[in-house]
Image: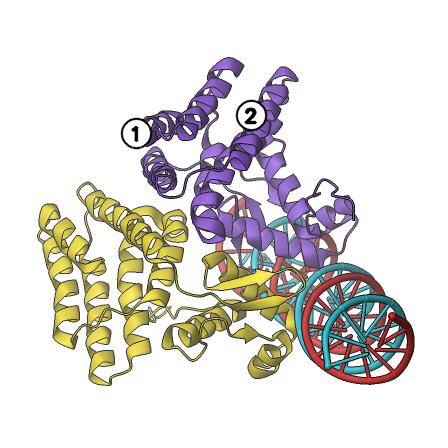
Chain colours: A purple, B yellow, C cyan, D red
Amino acid sequence: MAAAKPTKILSVKDQIADQLRSDIIAGDLAPNTKLNEQELAKRFGLSRGPIRDVILQLTKEGLLISKNNCGASVNSVLEPKLQKLMINLRRNIEVYAIENFKNNPLTEDDVTQLETILDELQGAFDREDFTEVTKVDISFHNYLIYKAGGEDLVNIWYPYVMRMRLNYKRITTSSECVEEHRGILQALREGDITRAVKAIKENIK
Amino acid sequence: MAAAKPTKILSVKDQIADQLRSDIIAGDLAPNTKLNEQELAKRFGLSRGPIRDVILQLTKEGLLISKNNCGASVNSVLEPKLQKLMINLRRNIEVYAIENFKNNPLTEDDVTQLETILDELQGAFDREDFTEVTKVDISFHNYLIYKAGGEDLVNIWYPYVMRMRLNYKRITTSSECVEEHRGILQALREGDITRAVKAIKENIK
DNA sequence: AAGCAGTTTATTGTTAACAACAAACATAGT
DNA sequence: ACTATGTTTGTTGTTAACAATAAACTGCTT
């Protein structure tokens, strides 16, 4: 059997969820926009069933807000105080993940994959595709979180990222953002956890 | 119009979710138990649709774990490290909530309601209905969290509580548990935030 | 007998029709 | 003119039948 590149298969619902998340992050779906199930179903060429599932999912993630019998709409930004709390909590999680690599260091394969992600990040910047930038940025962190705590940790972590992205986009230059991430990776590669923690704290704000 | 006591109306899905959560907490649904949609539908006298919604919801909460085309099963306990992180995060949230009451103190009505909850807690202990104890305990904290940060904060907080309950039950005597909570309420009532923070930290472990 | 391919069965994923509900509009009474 | 009631309309919630997938089983080949 030939060793073909493993292609990631996504379920229908995951693809729709990804698309809607992108739309919200990109601002195509502004806060308080009401989502119509039928419209979405038509847009994605499905029935309302899967759409409803996705809406429920995004609601749990905090991107949407749903009321009984009244549908779902895009959630608005958090009040500043809550936002600070969120940043704080997310930082806790990511620092935990980094510190975990003390006992459970990254493999060479991990490093390669993370580098690929950073290359993609650079590429997205170069193309000025900022929605993609955000997604790739998240996937970098996601890789670390998953490696450290698996599905469980990702599940608690994810909502924070999403809400933060919803709230504000840090204006960063291409080089700044990519360099920040390369710094994290480099520190991890060298096993310098202290520096990695510092770098991740600097990155999450 | 007579001012009747406002009765809380729960949606069908919320009721099912509550029931399943109770079952899991009570241990009637042990970890790794596979859930069958049809069985559940029959049990609650509904079709599979709403059941699927609830399963999705509980999956996002971390109580269940679902795989594509393979159904959902009760999630197992967290590894100790992750559990510590969880406790830590939950504590952060609850401390935030308490500190919030500095500027936004509890009203007399809040206090009355919280006292009612604590009376229920005592009652559940007296009846030795420990599943109910857990639920009422959670509702006490939930009241504070909601008051401090609304729906948004509850949504991030809730998964932690659930996972913690799933992991271990602190063995507490009736008086100890109820007194701990009364201590928190008393401190809040007197506006002694420092003491309240201390008490909540003591309570969450 | 062990391993593999094909088949069956049970369960989940999807769909489209139907029921229940909320909001907006129209109507009648004061 | 204004409030309150009734009606309509659009949207969400629910259901039951259908399609697709995964796991269990059967029988064949070596």
Judge left or right: residue A124 versus residue B114. right
Q: How many neighbours does mark 2 have within 10 angstroms: few (below 14), some (14-19), or many (20 or more)?
A: many
**Viewer-closest of B192 and B69:** B69
The image shows residue A17, relative to residue A108, as above or below, that is below
Residue pictured at 32% horizontal, 57% vertical: B80
Q: CA distance from mark 1 to mark 2?
A: 21 Å
Q: Which residue is mark 2?
A: A118
**Viewer-closest of A95 and A163:** A95
Which x, y percent locates residue B133? 27, 74
Q: Which residue is mark 1?
A: A194
- Quarter-wise, where is residue A26 in the image? top right
Residue type at mark 2?
A: Leu
- SS of the residue at dot 1? helix
Residue type at mark 1?
A: Thr
Which marked residue is nearer to the observer: mark 1 or mark 2?
A: 1
Q: How many marks?
A: 2
**Viewer-closest of B54 and B171:** B171
Quadrant housing the C terminus of chain B = bottom left
Q: Are marks 1 and 2 on the same chain?
A: yes
- SS of the residue at dot 2? helix
Q: How many neighbours does mark 1 have within 10 angstroms: few (below 14), some (14-19), or many (20 or more)?
A: some
Labels 1 and 2: the sequence-earlier one: 2
> Which mark, by number, is residue B171?
none
Judge left or right: residue B116 versus residue B43. left
Which x, y percent locates residue A73? 56, 45
- Label 1 resides on the chain identified as A
- Residue B193 visible in the current orientation: yes
Which x, y percent locates residue A62? 48, 46
Report if the CB atoms under discs 1 and 2 are less than 8 Å apart.
no
Residue pictured at 56% horizontal, 80% vertical: B44
- Label 2 resides on the chain identified as A
Quadrant housing the N terminus of chain B = bottom left
